[in-house]
Amino acid sequence: MTMINGYSSADGERLSEKERSLIERRERLLGPAYRLFYERPLHTVRGDGVWLYDEQGRRYLDAYNNVASIGHCHPRVVQAIAEQAAVLNTHTRYLQEGILDYAEDLLSTFPAELGQVMFTCTGSEANDLALRIARHHTGGTGVIITRFAYHGVTGDISALSPSLGSGITLPAHARTVRAPDAYRLGAENVGRLFAEDIRAAIADLRAKGIKPAALLLDGIFASDGVFAEPAGFLAEAVALARAEGLLYIADEVQCGFARTGAHMWGFQRHGVLPDLVTLGKPMGNGQPIAGVVARPEVLASFGRSVRYFNTFGGNPVSCAAGQAVLNVIREEKLQQRSAEIGDYLLQGFRRLAERHPLIGDVRGAGLFLGVELVSDRESKAPAAAQTRQVVNAMRERGVLISAAGPLENILKIRPLLAFEREHADLLIDTLDAALTEVVG
Ligand code: PMP
């Protein structure tokens, strides 16, 4: 079978001339590190609410993008960006009220102990900064992450993102622990086992003469395979790490801004209080804004001895977008909707599991859901090939999702917070049809 730019000839034959040419230009101009979604890549030209549109005007239900979380091209965000861009767009070295109003509003959504925020442009930068702060505060260097974590693309942070690929070599100061997989470890054991693994990782770092600085965790363990249940399972691990002198960095890039439904922030589901919280993706609904929320006592010595300036981070246009996102989440009651539609989807997927033996587990919180596909429910053998087929069959049927986990056998489903019941029904029905098609 011949390959065109990584696509088999079978896929290639289904591509239009335009799509072929875009793929070829992409590869020629952007080089080999980029990856496209789907066997037949999607050429998007427009977004509106929960829909993306391709060049032929066909619409796709977006159950995946958690950047344009409150809806593609949300008019309130578009208006806020346009208005601010027409008046002033400088940076954080001048006095300006927008950044302070936004900082105040954002911090009001956190527990009082988390009282300060520093702005960046990306989640990667936020994690990088949080790690620098944690190292400065503790005087240590060691970091504990999960085995298939993703935290971003800077030098330090990509080294702590094993899910980036086999080219990542874990640095000597890092230790990985098993993902808190309640499906395989058992819901009753997962919290204890996770804490035990972290205790062992701390001991191992110390045995090698490395002082641990931070426990860095994605609150929904997205790349590890989406692990949200049982709520509270993180408490033991976080208490242990903090008692051992590590700072707990809650990476909320995936699970923040009402994504998990009942709470604004993923860590709140676990009843824990982080030292540092990193934010990104949905924060500006596509406008690059991210940040680190911190306990002031953790920031104090870092801030005194290291000057911070991020040219674009927290600029007036980005803050205007961030403010519009917070306003829309409140006014359109998107947190409640995330909880409600999320539960509705969980129930719908569980009903599908009664008819589709390929579904081994249905899990998640709010509008961050995982459906694990297995070829045998007894052995829980991952059904990776079928998962890929389901993702592609859904795309062909006009619904966008993806896959997660080391073997990519978990359907990763992150509907836009703007989903209504009718969209949830379409998602469930399409998954039903895709599973039927794949099993044959
Ligand atoms: N942390 C997590 C958990 C993420 O999923 C991501 C992005 N996928 C990042 C950090 C990095 O964010 P960014 O791409 O904005 O640098």
Image (cartoon, helix red, strand yellow):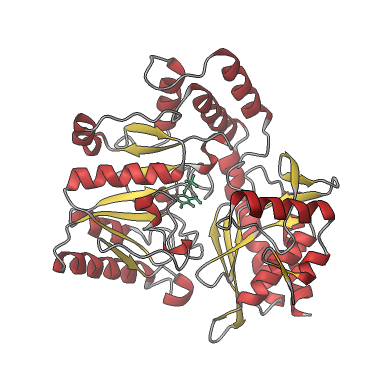
Q: Is residue 151 visible?
A: yes
> 146 left or right of 401?
left
Image point (18%, 35%), residue name:
301
Q: Is residue 157 above or below residue 356?
A: above
The residue at the far right in this view is: 56
Name the quadrant of the C terminus.
bottom right
Q: Position of residue 299 (x, y in %)?
A: 25, 36
As rendered, which of 56 and 71 lies closer to the eye?
56
Q: Is residue 229 visible?
A: no
Q: Position of residue 248 (x, y in %)?
A: 29, 51
Name the quadrant containing residue 352: bottom right
As rendered, which of 100 and 53 lies closer to the eye?
53
Image point (45%, 59%), residue name:
221
Image point (83%, 64%), residue name:
14
> 411 left or right of 396?
left
As rendered, which of 349 and 77 lies closer to the eye?
77
Name the quadrant containing residue 334: top right
Q: Is residue 147 above or below residue 31?
A: below
Q: Position of residue 95 (x, y in %)?
A: 38, 14
Name the quadrant of the N terminus.
bottom right
As rendered, which of 301 and 362 lies closer to the eye?
301
